[in-house]
Amino acid sequence: MKIKKAVIPVAGLGTRFLPATKAQPKEMLPVVGKPAVQYIVEEAVQAGIESIIFVTGKNKKSIEDHFDKSTELERMLEEKGKIAQLKEVQSISSMANIYYIRQKEPLGLGHAVLCAKQFIGDDPFAVLLGDDIMISKPPAIKQMMNVYERTGVPIVGVQQVPLADVSKYGIINPSNKKDDVYHIHDLIEKPDLEQAPSNLAILGRYILNPSIFPILETIERGAGNEIQLTDGLRHVCKKDGLMAIELQGNRYDIGDQLGYTKAIAEIGLQRPELRSKLLTYFDQLLKNEYQKKELIK
Ligand code: G1P
């Protein structure tokens, strides 16, 4: 069955990005000319998603404005003959059917997904988290859809992370692997290094079906006293099975400052109009750094 619906939770407060997120959502922080959340929506749309629901919270109105039609701006660009920008602005508001629902309390990712229950109805659906920008061909969520369409089994996207980072993620305990696809034996949210069953971390990509909702309605609060999606998925795993695919492509964890800065550098390098100037700049920057080191010695 084709996946046509996606849930994008954007209710997080962005405390790791203060003060930048004091008056604007972290999802709207620019990554080379586009807000971060636009990369996520584009990935979903390129994979064939037609309808998206944002699970929002306080101070997220600019996300709605960004994906809305802006009549005044469009008129102004048209009058000034700025046709390329006009087309770009128009394409943003017509990418997909976009819906919004408020997560009234910050009760965690599992609770955010549960807020989309009515919208999802009986269909399988994708979940994409805004902290992970994935640049890949085919799009990361499409790689997962291809496996789901073959197997009908819910699936999470994973990549290997340094052992020092396992406590930041949901970590899977994989059993047998075929091609890039694992069956999951169990999974655990943000384990200590000693408890981690592997270094395969769940990135913010999931294909689920509505059987997750009754589970999320009844599970106890987990890590951080929140309703954790990973805990819900443990039940799915035990009951109906759960798979993981090791995603091909570059992933940028823009939820932390280093990841965000790397995303800007690398996505900048992928832009033909910026590439050679940036390379010259990085080259000079490195030479300066080496020179400084020599002087210190
Ligand atoms: C969430 C999930 C975690 C996953 C991560 C990916 O954590 O709970 O399992 O590995 O996203 O980015 P968060 O980053 O919201 O703390």
Image: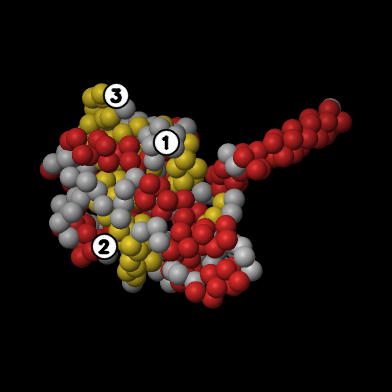
Mark 1: amino acid: Lys
Vertical position of residue 56 compared to residue 130: above or below: below
Residue occupied by mark 3: 179
Q: Residue at x 49, y 71 (%)?
A: 70
Q: Residue at x 53, y 70 (%)?
A: 74
Q: Earlier in the sequence, mark 3 or mark 1?
A: 1
Query: Which type of secondary structure does the marked residue at label 2 adopt?
Result: loop
Q: Residue at x 47, y 40 (%)?
A: 135
Task: For label 1, count other residues whose C-alpha is less than 10 Å away and answer few (under 14), some (14-19) or many (20+).
Answer: few
Mark 3: amino acid: Asp
Residue occupied by mark 1: 137
Task: For label 3, count other residues whose C-alpha is less than 10 Å away and answer few (under 14), some (14-19) or many (20+).
Answer: few
Residue occupied by mark 2: 116
Q: Residue 251's x, y, as percent?
A: 47, 40
**In the picture, which quadrant includes the C terminus?**
top right
Query: Which type of secondary structure does the marked residue at label 3 adopt?
Result: loop
Q: Residue at x 45, y 70 (%)?
A: 69
Q: Which mark is residue 285?
A: none
Q: Does 93 sit left or right of 258 as displayed? A: left
Of marks 1 and 2, the one in the foreground? 1
Mark 2: amino acid: Ala
